[in-house]
């Protein structure tokens, strides 16, 4: 595992490099990299190739405890705990799930076993109770070893908040915010106003990682627009490399252009099969390195949204 503790100059370089790094080869999807992005604030960018192993993580070291951002899969939760222990011996008191999906929340039980409380937005409660536990049990049954589910029991969050929950001990401040329905109905983000750092979960990702199956893309656009009002210096996304605030606009542009293209095609009487063959969003290829038509599920989902 590579490990970085950048000085300000290095971080500035990374920000200025921005999204161009995707096509220039600076991004390294085969590596898991841990970066101290601010004093006591860590970002773990998880590898995505040659295979998917989970989401990105973060943790914040407070005066007397640690908050971990994203429980991840159980196996990755164990790895993150080991990494946290390399940075501090303070107890992990909280783990924040940005949403209910297994790669962000199935590791709750691992943290709960060491005494941590799992936190999520109130709007995600019903999703944990239904799709969340179903997904966990299915993975446990069909693929118990790859992600570490084994014989573990499902660990739901014990603390839910409606719109905002603040954790502030005078040394660190983290604001957990539910802005609206984005990637899922219960999406929430972690905002660190003292540092200008936003951990977005899958409300904003850097690369070909969008999944729309639980989304509302019109509302998702509105959520991204609202998040842009924050004075952000660094975005730590749910998947992909960290970068500057412009990632929010890039993420929004994908949904705006996807909806515009599909709506125009529908207005012309084009069917879904034709749209899937002909759709072309050049900027998306520049951003992710793959053509937009490869995200077939997203095309199908937006088509259904707009045909209602």
Image (cartoon, rainbow, N blue to C red):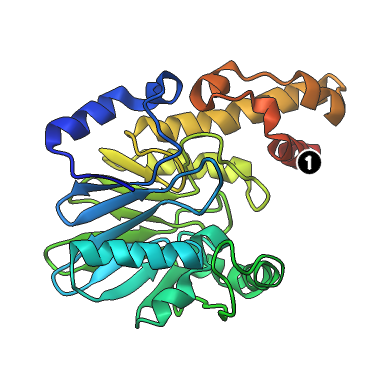
Q: Secondary structure at mark 1?
A: helix
- Residue situated in front as seen by the camera: 1 or 207: 1
Q: Is residue 19 visible?
A: yes
Query: Where 223 sits versus 63, above or below?
Result: above
Q: Position of residue 305 (x, y in %)?
A: 74, 42
- Residue situated in front as seen by the camera: 138 or 198: 138
Q: Position of residue 111 (x, y in %)?
A: 40, 75
Query: Where 150 sits versus 181, above or below?
Result: below
Q: Position of residue 16 (x, y in %)?
A: 26, 24
Mark 1, residue position? 304
Q: Residue at x 72, y 21 (%)?
A: 279
Q: Residue at x 37, y 69 (%)?
A: 95
- Residue situated in front as seen by the camera: 242 or 269: 242
- In the visual, does 242 lie left or right of 110? left
Structural crowding at the residue carrying mark 1, measured as other residues with C-alpha within 10 Å and reported as few (<14), some (14–19) or many (≥20):
few
Q: Quadrant of residue 234?
A: top left
Query: Where 119 sits versus 6, above or below?
Result: below
Q: Is residue 166 visible?
A: no
Q: Quadrant of residue 33?
A: top left
Query: Where 102 sits versus 158, above or below?
Result: above
- In the visual, does 308 lie left or right of 1? right
Quarter of the image with the C terminus in it? top right
Q: Position of residue 136 (x, y in %)?
A: 63, 70
Q: Residue at x 45, y 53 (%)?
A: 179
């Amino acid at each position: 595992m590579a490990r970085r503790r950048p000085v300000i100059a290095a971080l500035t370089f990374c920000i200025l490099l921005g999204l161009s790094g995707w096509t220039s080869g600076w991004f390294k999807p085969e590596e898991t990299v841990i970066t101290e992005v601010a004093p006591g604030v860590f970002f773990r960018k998880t590898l995505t190739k040659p295979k998917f192993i989970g989401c990105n993580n973060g943790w914040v070291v407070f005066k007397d405890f640690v908050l971990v951002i994203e429980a991840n899969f159980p196996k990755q939760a164990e790895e993150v705990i080991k990494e946290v222990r390399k940075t501090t011996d303070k107890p992990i008191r909280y783990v924040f799930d940005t949403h209910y999906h297994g790669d962000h929340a199935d590791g709750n039980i691992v943290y709960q076993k060491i005494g941590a409380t799992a936190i999520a937005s109130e709007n995600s409660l019903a999703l944990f109770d239904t799709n969340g536990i179903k997904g966990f049990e299915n993975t446990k049954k069909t693929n118990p070893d790859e992600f570490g589910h084994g014989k573990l029991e499902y660990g739901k969050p014990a603390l839910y908040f409606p719109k905002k929950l603040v954790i502030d001990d005078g040394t660190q401040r983290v604001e957990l915010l539910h802005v609206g329905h984005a990637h899922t109905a219960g999406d929430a983000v972690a905002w660190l106003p003292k540092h200008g750092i936003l951990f977005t979960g899958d409300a904003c990702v850097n690369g070909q990682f969008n999944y729309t199956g639980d989304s509302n893309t019109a509302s998702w656009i509105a959520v991204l627009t609202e998040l842009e009002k924050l004075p952000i210096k660094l975005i730590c996304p749910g998947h992909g490399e960290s970068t500057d605030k412009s990632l929010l606009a890039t993420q929004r542009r994908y949904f705006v252009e996807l909806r515009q293209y599909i709506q125009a095609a529908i207005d012309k009487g084009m069917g879904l099969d034709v749209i899937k063959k002909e759709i072309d969003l050049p900027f998306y290829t520049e951003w992710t390195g793959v053509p937009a038509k490869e995200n077939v599920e997203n095309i199908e989902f937006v088509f259904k949204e707009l045909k209602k």
